[in-house]
Image (tube, rainbow, N blue to C red):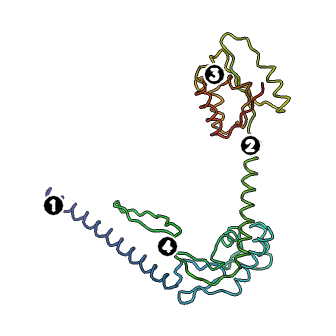
Amino acid sequence: MIYMSNRDSLEQGNNEKLYQYFLEEERKYKAARIALGLKRAREQGRVIISRVPFGYRSSYGKLQIDVQEAKVVEKVFQYLAEEKSYKSVSNMLNSHGYSYKNRPWTPSNIRLIAKSPIYIGELYFNKTTTRYLDDGKSQIIKNPQSEWKKISVPSIVTPELFNRVQRILSMKTDKKIKLEENKMTSNKKIVFYHRTNFGSKEDYQPSAQILKSRLNNIDKFYIDDSCSGISDPFKRGSFQKMKKDIEAGMIGKVVIKDYNRISRKNEDLAKVLDFLRTNGVEVVICN
């Protein structure tokens, strides 16, 4: 058994810290040299990338067009310009016997090609900078576009065709988002909120019947009976239940007889309307 003094233990701990420190500094030094080498190579027009894009081949640090693959790339853009989907384009290429790097085409492969500006001769580096932190971790920071450096590569498709495809894809995305929003809205409930005054025997049912005829359907009623118009709406029982359902994304419209049914205090009314607006809830008044 070996006994170690406190001094020996302290020295060993310090040595371990020094060892880790030098390892980290060496790692930073190597990473900086690699980054500098890549930067210089790219400034000389040499293409240093981990994977050669489909349609190209690498020769002495330069990207050159692979004629056979380039023809397939042209077909991809032509099909997309005809407003065909990623899936239908991949199916068409597979049915005609084309392969993507010796594998069947997938919609993801089509999307990757469609979005890449390299096919109109635009390849950039210096888009990010790696910053090393004191704790040994690294952080990747996006550089402003003004600091990007361009490498000229041969283009496969014309800018006109590429830009046309981008517009079509953008329109499809906007349409899809709108359909999803409409679907979400259509699934949300139309509810009726009402507050009756202290000691009031007011009947909200006539208003509800009128609303049903106008809006086709009221899915749920939230009624706070015998509440003061200056009370805090967010502290009322039924309003709290409605608030919870709104935050859960269940409600799309709140119908009220008039704004006084929410609150007679302008400040509280403004808070409620802001809450509804923030959660995408439409307010319908029927008096």
User: Which secondary structure lies at badge 4?
Assistant: loop
Locate residue 2, reporting x and y percent: 17, 61
Q: Which of marks 1 and 4 is nearer the N terminus?
A: 1
Nearest to the eye among marks 4 and 2: give it. Answer: 4
Residue toward you, 184 or 2: 184
Nearest to the eye among marks 2 and 3: give it. Answer: 3
Q: Earlier in the sequence, mark 3 or mark 1?
A: 1
The amino acid pointed to by label 2 is Thr
Q: Name the residue under label 4.
A: 126
Locate residue 60, reporting x and y percent: 53, 90
For the N terminus, give its image quadrant: bottom left
- Residue at position x 72%, y 53% from top? 177
User: Which secondary structure lies at badge 3?
Assistant: loop
Q: Dividing the picture into quarters, in which one does residue 54 lie? A: bottom right
For the C terminus, give its image quadrant: top right
Q: Distance between the residues labelled 1 and 2?
A: 71 Å
Q: Distance between the residues labelled 3 and 1?
A: 77 Å
The amino acid pointed to by label 4 is Asn
Q: Mark 1 points at which residue?
A: 8
Q: Name the residue under label 3.
A: 264
The amino acid pointed to by label 1 is Asp
Q: In this view, does 25 lie to the left or right of 239?
A: left
Q: How far apart are marks 3 and 4 (CA)?
A: 59 Å
Q: Name the residue under label 2.
A: 185
- Residue at position x 15%, y 61% from top? 8
Pointer 4 local density, CA inside 10 Å: few below 14, some 14–19, many at least 20: some
The residue at the far top in this view is 199
Pointer 1 local density, CA inside 10 Å: few below 14, some 14–19, many at least 20: few
